[in-house]
Image (cartoon, rainbow, N blue to C red):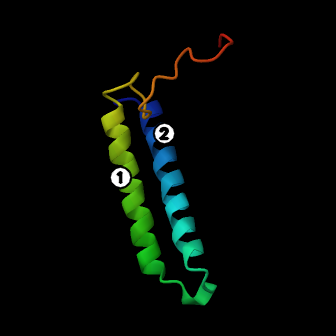
C-alpha cells in the first residue's frame, strides 16, 4: 500500500468506477443533456470513487499487496 504502483492502480480503479457510475446515472434516466442534474451525477460518481478507493486500501492487506482482492500473480500460462 505504500508504493507508487499501488496508488496508480487504486487511482485507475477509482476513476474507472466513477466514470462507470456517472455513465449509469446519465443513461438510466434517458433524458436530454440540458436536463441532467450534474451535481447529483458528480456526487454519485464521487461516492463510487471513494468506495472504490477504500476497497483498494482494504484489498492491499489481503492479496499480494496491490489494489485487487485476488492474487493474480502467476495465474497466466506464460512466464513474464
| Residue 51 picture location, percent across and down | 35, 52
Tell me if residue 49 comes above or below residue 44 in the rendering. above
Tell me if residue 3 comes above or below residue 39 in the rendering. above
**Residue at numbered disc 2:** 8
- Confirm or deny contact between disc 1 and disc 2 (CB under 8 A): no
| Residue 10 picture location, percent across and down | 44, 41
Local crowd size for mark 1, using a 10 Å CA cut-off: few (<14), some (14–19), many (≥20): some
Along the line of sight, the residue nearer the viewer: 31 or 54: 31
Q: Residue at x 51, y 45 (%)?
A: 12
Q: Secondary structure at mark 1?
A: helix
Q: Can you tell which of label 1 and label 2 is closer to the viewer?
A: 1
Q: Residue furthest bottom?
A: 35
Whichever of labels 1 and 2 marks the residue nearer the N terminus, that label is 2
- Quadrant holding the N terminus: top left
Q: Residue at x 42, y 77 (%)?
A: 40
How many numbered dots are placed on residues in this image? 2
Q: Secondary structure at mark 2?
A: helix
| Residue 23 picture location, percent across and down | 57, 66
Local crowd size for mark 2, using a 10 Å CA cut-off: few (<14), some (14–19), many (≥20): few
**Residue at numbered disc 1:** 51
Amino acid at each position: 500500500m505504500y508504493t507508487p504502483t499501488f496508488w496508480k492502480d487504486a487511482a485507475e480503479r477509482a476513476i474507472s468506477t466513477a466514470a462507470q457510475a456517472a455513465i449509469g446515472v446519465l443513461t438510466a434516466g434517458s433524458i436530454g443533456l440540458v436536463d441532467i442534474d450534474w451535481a447529483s451525477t458528480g456526487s454519485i460518481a464521487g461516492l463510487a470513487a471513494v468506495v472504490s478507493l477504500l476497497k483498494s486500501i482494504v484489498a492491499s492487506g489481503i492479496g499480494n499487496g496491490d489494489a485487487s482482492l485476488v492474487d493474480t500473480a502467476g495465474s497466466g500460462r506464460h512466464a513474464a
